[in-house]
Image (tube, rainbow, N blue to C red):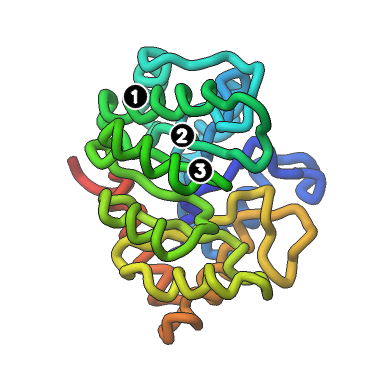
Amino acid sequence: MLIDSHCHLDRVDLSLYQNDFSTFMQHTRDAGVGHMLCVSIDLESYPEMLALVLPYEDISISVGVHPNDFDRREPDVADLVALAAHPRNVAIGETGLDFFRSQGDLDWQRKRFRTHIQAAIEAGKPLIVHTRDARQETLEIMAEEKAEQAGGVLHCFTENWDMASAGLEMGFYISFSGIVTFKNAGELRDVAARVPLDRLLIETDSPYLAPTPYRGKPNEPKYLYRVAEAIAELRGMEAEELAVQTAVNFQRLFGVGQSA
């Protein structure tokens, strides 16, 4: 069974499925995807996201505000903890730092990241971390706020081995997206081959970052198999074996499918 550890199902283009989410879900299951984590990026659309996925037991959710979302409702710790209490919620995020898309004084990003870490610790939920062009500051804030107390995942990982190693030292998992299939991703593939198998996750980040040979098209969870195949080849193992292990890792980290 494949588990998509990070996707945005409320933003997937349903036009190929007669604008019917249940049809989309059937195609996704037929592709071998047994569970998905639908990740929040803002609080304004959170109620609609929740309503969309709630009928489907094979979808978990997170709550958080993406670091690039400026001029949005700014969450406080109490907001996030209260929303994370929903029985289908398994994580806080996505959160983090992104200095690639956002410019100027980014103290608001840093503050928001700290708020999410504090909420994850208080709620007892793992943290989903987004980082881009902010490698050192991301690690510094995680250390200062004791993010290791929450644990979590560095999602859609695109950084080097040094950052992966630092994240692993804090108890975090490393998740790879379709970027690992790109021709120019040599350094990233090296990291994907080195991360301990029991700390590895896979994702699509749908509807973004479709893997080769679908690059440039809208992404979907049904393409997750390409990520699994690419990483399995790098590691000299069967894709089915990698799918099973990453599913076990997901269940361990997020407490899905495990007894309390």
- In the drawing, what numbered circle is on residue 93? 2
All told, the count of numbered labels is: 3
Location of residue 218 in the rendering, given as x and y in whole percent from the top left corner: 75, 53
Front in this rendered view, residue 161 or 11: 161
- Marks 2 and 1, how far apart at CA: 10 Å
Front in this rendered view, residue 121 or 132: 132
Location of residue 64 in the rendering, given as x and y in whole percent from the top left corner: 49, 28
Q: Hey, which quadrant is residue 125 in on the image?
A: top left
Residue beneath the point at 42% across and 65% down? 161
For marks 3 and 1, the one nearer the N-term is 1
The residue pinned by badge 3 equals 130
- Marks 2 and 3, how far apart at CA: 9 Å
Residue beneath the point at 52% across and 44% down? 134
Residue sticking out furthest to the left: 260
Quadrant in which the N terminus appears: bottom left
Location of residue 221 in the rendering, given as x and y in whole percent from the top left corner: 60, 55
For marks 2 and 3, the one nearer the N-term is 2
Q: Hey, which quadrant is residue 81 in on the image?
A: top left
Q: Are marks 2 and 3 in contact (CB under 8 Å)?
A: yes
Badge 2 local density, few (<14 within 10 Å), some, or many (20+)? many
What SS does tag 1 mark?
helix
Residue sticking out furthest to the bottom: 236
Quadrant in which the C terminus appears: top left
Asked whether residue 36 is in view, the answer is: no
